[in-house]
Image (spheres, rainbow, N blue to C red):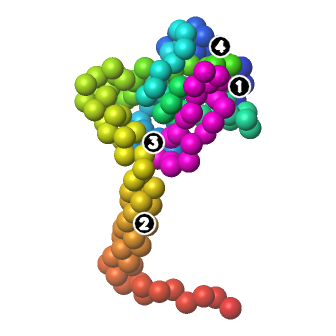
Amino acid sequence: MIDTTSIEQAVARGHFVINPHGVSMWPMIRNGKDSVLIEPVDGRLSKYDIPLYKDRLGRYVIHRIIEVTDTGYIICGDGLFEKEYDITDANIIGIVAGFFRKEKFIPCTSKGYMFYVKLWVGLMFVRKPIIVTVRKCRILRNYINIAFTRLKNGEPLIRKKKK
């Protein structure tokens, strides 16, 4: 079991690299492939920043700020379309300074990254159909790969259920 206080302590000491799991920040962060660099927070965060925070259930979450309010932040993962409200500065542990894609480090200040962020957040109103379509295409691709593998191995496409 992970000693959760060590995450807060590691971030407070400086740079901390973590491998996030899940699809909530896809397409920016790919599950099991990319790593993110977390730094300590210095003051209030801004729109487009990506905090590492603890949610109401005590889970560590990395999602993007899409709006700053007087009392906190409205946050949504890049791969999600439901907003999370009432995240305050007290919930925030650190901020993503950049991420590693393969061997390359991409800072959250780069022009290409900022273009992506502004475009993706700007497309919030059409994000749901885009994400649903991509997920269905991935499922279909997996079924096709399984079918080709079975054909290649001389197996039947549809396996009979055992009684």
- Residue ID for mark 4: 9
12 or 67, nearer to the observer: 67
Q: Are marks 2 and 3 in contact (CB under 8 Å)?
A: no
Highlighted range, magenta: 69-88
Q: Secondary structure at mark 2?
A: helix
Type of amino acid at the residue the image marks with label 1: Thr
Assign the magenta stretch its main secondary structure: loop
Mark 2: amino acid: Lys
Name the residue at 72% across, 25% down: 3
Distance, label 1 to label 2, CA atoms, is 35 Å
- Marks 3 and 4 in Cβ contact (< 8 Å): no
User: Quick check: 72 above or below 74?
Assistant: above
Marks 4, 2: nearer the viewer:
2
Please tell me whether mark 3 sits on a helix, a strand or a loop. Answer: loop
* Label at residue 78: 3
Q: In the image, what residue type sits under mark 3?
A: Asp
Give the quadrant of residue 132. bottom left
Residue behind mark 2: 136
| Left or right of 46 in this view: 72 | right
Q: Earlier in the sequence, mark 3 or mark 4?
A: 4
SS at mark 1?
helix
Query: Residue 59's spot in the image, x, y percent?
Result: 68, 35
| Residue displayed at 46% across by 47% down | 79
Question: Does 153 appear above or below 78?
Answer: below
Distance, label 4 to label 1, CA atoms, is: 9 Å
Between marks 3 and 4 in the image, the one whose residue lies nearer the viewer = 3
Residue furthest left as drawn: 112
Quadrant in which the C terminus is drawn:
bottom right
Residue identified by numbered label 1: 4
Q: Taking the image as drawn, is residue 32 in sight?
A: no
- Contact between labelled residues 1 and 3, with CB atoms less than 8 Å apart: no
What residue is at 51 percent from the left and 30 percent from the top?
A: 67
